[in-house]
Image: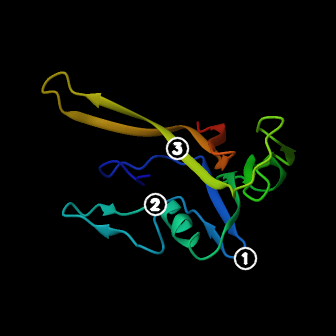
Amino acid sequence: MPSDFHGVKPHLKYLFTATFEDGKVIQQSPEDFSQIDPPVRDENGILQGRSAFHDVLTYEEISPLVTFELQEQGIFGLVANKFSVDLRTGLFTVNGLQFNAAEQLFIPTAPFQIVFCRETHRQQDISQKDGRVVAERIYVNRYLIGWKTTWKNEKYQVTIAVDGR
């Protein structure tokens, strides 16, 4: 998941917090760069590097991921929207309300793995004179969080979509 598109960073409405079985917590910053593999400047002076989600995937090799939460950026307390998935049970929580999004008779026998992605929209203003890009904006349309697993030799994936605008 790139943190930027040729120097244009998307605004992130939600930032994630990942909590691991051993108590380790990884929090995404608005800059969305890895702390394990820090960014470097390219030949144009633009920071390039892996996203903070890289740290989550890397740390999973040390300790299992327990919960993954998205919280609305810049808003705290009871008014901030929060969405999470518990990777021990497969249950989702939206603003404190817990629910199961899996099939009614689904009883997993394998551990859950995190599913997280951002669906982005890239908008460019093009000069009619010479066809060059004069402005560019990147939006996150929606976030998808959830889990995947194998049950009875079948692959399952369950996600919820969170509006990114």
Label 3 close to label 2 by CB (< 8 Å): no
Question: Which residue corresponds to mark 2?
Answer: 51
Q: Quadrant of the C terminus?
A: top right
Task: Say which amino acid is labelled 2.
Answer: Ser
User: Crowding near pointer 1: few (<14 within 10 Å), some, many (20+)?
Assistant: few
Say if 23 sits above or below 145 in the image.
Answer: below
In the depicted view, which residue is nearer to us: 138 or 112?
Answer: 112
Residue furthest to the front in view is 153
Marks 3/2: CA–CA distance: 12 Å
Nearer to us: label 2 or label 1:
1
For the point 45% across and 46% down, the residue is 10
* Secondary-structure class at tag 3: strand
* Secondary-structure class at tag 1: loop
Task: Say which amino acid is labelled 3.
Answer: Arg
Q: Earlier in the sequence, mark 1 or mark 3?
A: 1
Marks 1/3: CA–CA distance: 26 Å
Give the x, y percent position of residue 108.
Answer: 75, 50
Give the x, y percent position of residue 155.
Answer: 61, 43
Question: Which residue corresponds to mark 3?
Answer: 118
* Secondary-structure class at tag 2: loop
Give the x, y percent position of residue 85.
Answer: 73, 52
Say if 9 sits above or below 27 in the image.
Answer: above
Q: Earlier in the sequence, mark 3 or mark 2?
A: 2
In the rendered image, which quarter is residue 97 located in? top right
